[in-house]
Amino acid sequence: MADPFHFSVPGAEAVFDGKFLTLKNAGTVRIWQLCNGWKTVYTGFQMPEAFSFDAAGEADWDITACSGCAELLSAECQETDQKIRITSIFHYPESHIYLKHKIDCYPGISGMRTQISMKHEKEIPAQERSPERDQVPQFVSGYSESVPFSAEHYKYVAFGFNNDSQHRYSLDMPILTESRREAHPVQGRESIGNCNGIIFADEQERGFILVKESHKCANSPGIATGEFILFRDKIVSTGLGFSDGSPHWLSGDDYRPAWANWMIPFRNGAFGAVQALKEFDRARYPFRKDRDMFIAMNTWGSRGDGSLSRLAAVEENVLAELESCADLGIDLLQIDDGWQFDPGTADFQNCAWTPSEKGFPHGWSAVRERAKKLGMKLGLWAPPDFITAEQLLKNIQDGGFRRIKLDFLNLTKRKLLDETLSFAKSIVDGADEPVGINWDITEACPRMGFYFGREYGNIFLQNCENSPQGATFKRFIAYDPEVTLNQTWLLSKYFNLNQVQITIQRIAESPHGKGYSQDYACGIALMGNPLFFLETRRFTEDERELVKDVISVYKQHREQILSGYVYPVGNQPDGTTWTGFQCICSDHEGYLTVFREKAAAEDEFIFELIQVPAGKQIKLTGLYRGKDTLLVSDENGRYCFCGLPCGSWAFYRYEVV
């Protein structure tokens, strides 16, 4: 039997008395009772005056491989990496299985992350088929988290994000999927699938959020990511991440982790829910200024199909682009596919994964020296299916690369997913300088998704390209500022934009760019990580001046923006309306980008800003195109914006006065 403990740090406390486990953090309380595992018996915003629960039924998890009674062997709590972790080990003697249960919380941040891992109690022969292995249970079904509540008193919003942005780059195929309804399970049970998370709220505008930490997308379920199943008295999260069509048995050498779950209590209605989600997400996947704050340029995106775009990844072009990017104020140049081949060739199977002697006659030395001279950083493209971690680390060392875009992922098997995460970890941990990953989610096949792997970097969202006349070109990915604005706006409803690369292209070359200016395309990206997915020497001098002006202003404020929380305001972009983003830096200040799309008929628009008390005035400081002004709210606490021509935008800093 595990020993009791009492652990506390400022803002959080964990207590195990031998029967009950209590976790208090950020004004919330969750209590588990020892009942064949941990069983949640109370969640709330204050400690009950007295409690003596008699927990019927089973633990918060139910896994087919784990039969019989569970014995608690150990339970301990410690603080590590700015989080509190409670680790418990259970043993199922009948099944010969050990189960590790982890609870992570971040002091001062509402919510917790739970995860189970399992292993067999003895070593198993390495052969894929053997009598010993056949006696070990396979992972086939079960759930890893459940939250008790009375569903009839709640409404819910299920939300999920779609990958395959390359083929879903259209206003008709939104990146966000949402469903809203009363929490009344038909016949006592309702399956809620195709979502990343679900928000439950009661009549007092309080509730909780459940998120599956996995590579699942709304249109790409991934590896056994399961679904949420709603009962009248609880919600459970199914899908362990083990069963993917290949034989996976528990091994005796190490614990095999299942997908984790986030449970985040909230107050203060819809805003309180999303703010709690974004704060927990940022605690789980911290933004690292030294690694993640940059404006990037990528050599792909200006020449058409693959064979033509690879020609941009040669020394002569990279050196010229470094000069151009430095002049514009861009921080990092990323060399995309093509650096590893002689120009005009592409043989992935027989590639040495060193810079091509014909493409880069000086190896990496010339571009590294030029970047250093100009005060710029370098990034590189690589496919883990072909290049080894050792080969990539050698290139990182020789070239001084700080950002690695990982591509060609097709993570249909758990083994592939685990190997890819290990690959990323070895790159991030093995480099001498801070190095981050760009996770490409532009294809339909399972990749890293939105809620997985971001401890290593951020999301590469879109392959939005332009093409010179006569080049072979995929028209469906031709850059469209209205679609990029729409996807960014929808993503910001539930997701932190400071870990998403937002594409900028040359408006003059886009078949959808008429009616917009080059700075408009730049403005769309300012609340995320701006990415120039083009060769910047294609800009005219007038375009360059616009880009330089936007970058110069943005850099003065980007640290505050990247530290704030971004929300969509105005209408959902569709080419005909006023829209924008609000970055909340504190209760009384932040930033606004306001867009009047080219077909917006109204000369003024009423915006409802977030977390601005009714009746308060807003002092606007025009940072780009916008004018300094003092806005007075109407009787409903809304603010009127005007003065923008069609197809234009403005960038403001605001203060509540």
Image (cartoon, rainbow, N blue to C red):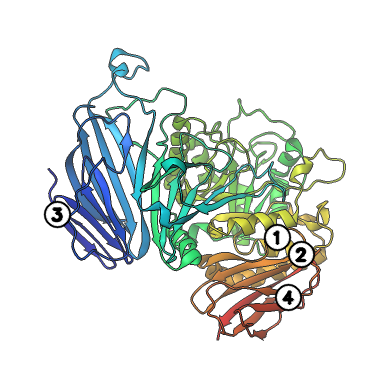
Which quadrant of the figure has residue 296? bottom right
Q: Residue at x 49, y 77 (%)?
A: 587
Instruction: Between residue 379 and residue 225, name the one nearer to us.
Output: 225
Q: Position of residue 28 (x, y in %)?
A: 32, 63
**Residues at discs 2 and 1 in contact (Cβ within 8 Å):** yes
Q: What number is the disc on residue 597? A: 2
Indicate which disc, 3 or 2, sits on the residue closer to the N terminus.
3
Q: Position of residue 644 (x, y in %)?
A: 77, 74
44 displayed left or right of 300: left
Indicate which disc, 2 or 1, sits on the residue closer to the N terminus.
1
Estimate the spatial distance between the alpha carbons at disc 3 and disc 2, rounded to whole Å. 60 Å
Kind of residue at badge 1: Pro
Q: Is residue 401 visible?
A: no
Q: What number is the disc on residue 74? A: none
Mark 3 highlights which residue?
17
Q: Position of residue 463 (x, y in %)?
A: 68, 46
Kind of residue at badge 4: Arg
Indicate which disc, 4 or 2, sits on the residue closer to the N terminus.
2
Mark 1 highlights which residue?
573
Estimate the spatial distance between the alpha carbons at disc 1 and disc 3, rounded to whole Å. 54 Å
Mark 4: secondary structure? loop
Indicate which disc, 1 or 4, sits on the residue closer to the N terminus.
1
Mark 1: secondary structure? loop
Indicate which disc, 1 or 3, sits on the residue closer to the N terminus.
3
Estimate the spatial distance between the alpha carbons at disc 2 and disc 1, rounded to whole Å. 8 Å
Compared to residue 290, the image places residue 214 above or below, namely above
Q: What number is the disc on residue 625? A: 4
Q: Residue at x 18, y 62 (%)?
A: 50
Mark 3: secondary structure? loop
